[in-house]
Image (tube, helix red, strand yellow):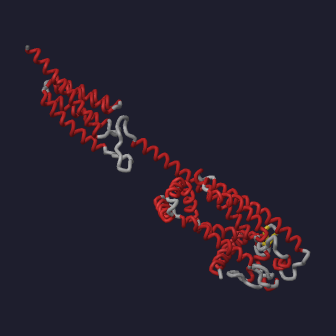
Amino acid sequence: MLDFIYYPISWILWAWHKAFSWLLGAVGLPVDSSPNLSGLAWALAIMFLTVTVRLILLYPMVKQIRTTQKMSELQPQIKAIQKKYANDRQRMSMEMSKLQKENGVNMAMGCLPMLVQIPVFIGLFHVLRMFNKMGGGAGGMGFTAEQTRNSGNYFFKPNEVQSFLDARLFGAPLSGYISQPKDQYAAFYPLGVYHPEDAHSLFVAILCVTIPMLLISAVATHFNARMSINRQTAAAAANPQANVMNKMMLWFFPIMILGTGVMWHVGLLTYMLTNNIWTFCQQYFLYKKMDKEKLEAKEKLEEARAANAPRPGVKPKRDKHGKVIVVEQPKAVETAVAEKKLGVFSGLFKMKGDGAAATGASDFADAAAGSVGDSDGAAAGSAASDNASGAAGKGGAAKAAASSASAGVGAKSSAAGSVESVDADAKAQRQAAQRARQHANKNRKGKKKKKR
């Protein structure tokens, strides 16, 4: 009925056994003549069957962990939706789907690894059980020891079945289990070799191997669950359904492993142990990577906030959703705007006369230095003032204005590193123009007094 699962599992196990048998033989280890070395080859084949399955499931497993973490972070929003649409299940389902879609959460991808691992576990359990077909109970076909050793098992031929039955892992057969009937032990020995007195020593060997493996598997299952639960937010952990599931993962599943372990083959426990080790390593490195990504995202967010923060006294512009609009003007555009506005002041200074031009140019340079707000801007503004005064002394109002404008552009260019809005520039320039007109009026009144 489930041959579409049993044959692929048996083929992967067969392929890895062939690979490790050749590898151990290549280094001079007699796999065929030593039950312990044969058991090592079969145990490695089962372990790498587990690795193969986990590699196939690596991407969906990573998605599952990320989905679980994301759902934990979305718990406040989920609770808000549940509270808002408590009387409208259909609308609640729609809003939940919308929330998951907006945050890139795929619940089906989160369930896929579990749905795939269950058939693999069942398939491996069945394949290992069918190596020994003695008995009439569950999985037994009523074969004798001779029939069992001379029959195949899915992808395995009779000689390979014999190799598996004769293999030992620390003295225990790989298809042996604690509750196995003693009369089935005959299949673990070549024909005519087994004696009923051997049953006790074989049972003790099975106990000595399976009990430590069961304990390690149960403890590893508990700590893997605890590692995952520790990643949950307080809101997610407070969810009644999540709380029940957490307790099941922490206590029920490990206890279930111990309770049902009497029916688990040594080979199946090898699979479980390898699977738990893989899960622990995968979660450790993935959580470490996720923490690093979260830290980098936080640092980038803080840098963006610092870069986009408005200057003191300037109200940030916001869109209709209340988000701050960030407008970054290139330095070339800022310089062009400054030159255009400074050109207006140049014409203004030229119209006002020599004295007004010199005074206004000097005042504009001071305003430019003040609006820049740093040491470079102040130095450039001072240079603008000196150049303007020198040019006015020679009687060249236009030259003074041009010199002031050029120096002002230099001041503006030297402060291009600080981002200023066009409105702030216009305000500073209007203030400079007002001071220039005030000085021009004072100079005009002074000249009239001298003439009188």
Q: Is residue 132 left or right of residue 74?
A: right
Q: Is residue 96 left or right of residue 239?
A: left
Residues 285 and 229: in front is 229
Which residue occupies 52% across, 58% down?
Answer: 82
Question: Is residue 330 visible in the rendered structure shown here?
Answer: yes
Tell me where residue 196 appears, x and y as whole percent.
Answer: 90, 77
* Figure quadrant of the N terminus: bottom right
Residues 229 and 236: in front is 236
- Eyeballing the image, is 77 above or below 376? below
Q: Is residue 44 left or right of residue 173?
A: left
Residue 189 lies in quadrant: bottom right
| Numbered disc total | 0
Question: Is residue 29 visible in the rendered structure shown here?
Answer: no
- Eyeballing the image, is 253 above or below 288? below
Looking at this rendering, what residue extends furthest in the left direction? Answer: 452
Residues 59 and 381: in front is 59
Tell me where residue 130 appears, x and y as whole percent.
Answer: 74, 79
Looking at this rendering, what residue extends furthest in the front direction? Answer: 87
Q: Is residue 252 left or right of residue 396?
A: right
Which residue occupies 85% across, 70% down?
Answer: 203
Which residue occupies 56% across, 55% down?
Answer: 72
Residues 149 and 163: in front is 149
Residue 47 lies in quadrant: bottom right
Tell me where residue 212 appears, x and y as whole percent.
Answer: 79, 62
- Eyeballing the image, is 157 above or below 223? below
Residue 398 lies in quadrant: top left
Tell me where residue 403 appears, x and y as whole percent.
Answer: 20, 31
* Figure quadrant of the C terminus: top left
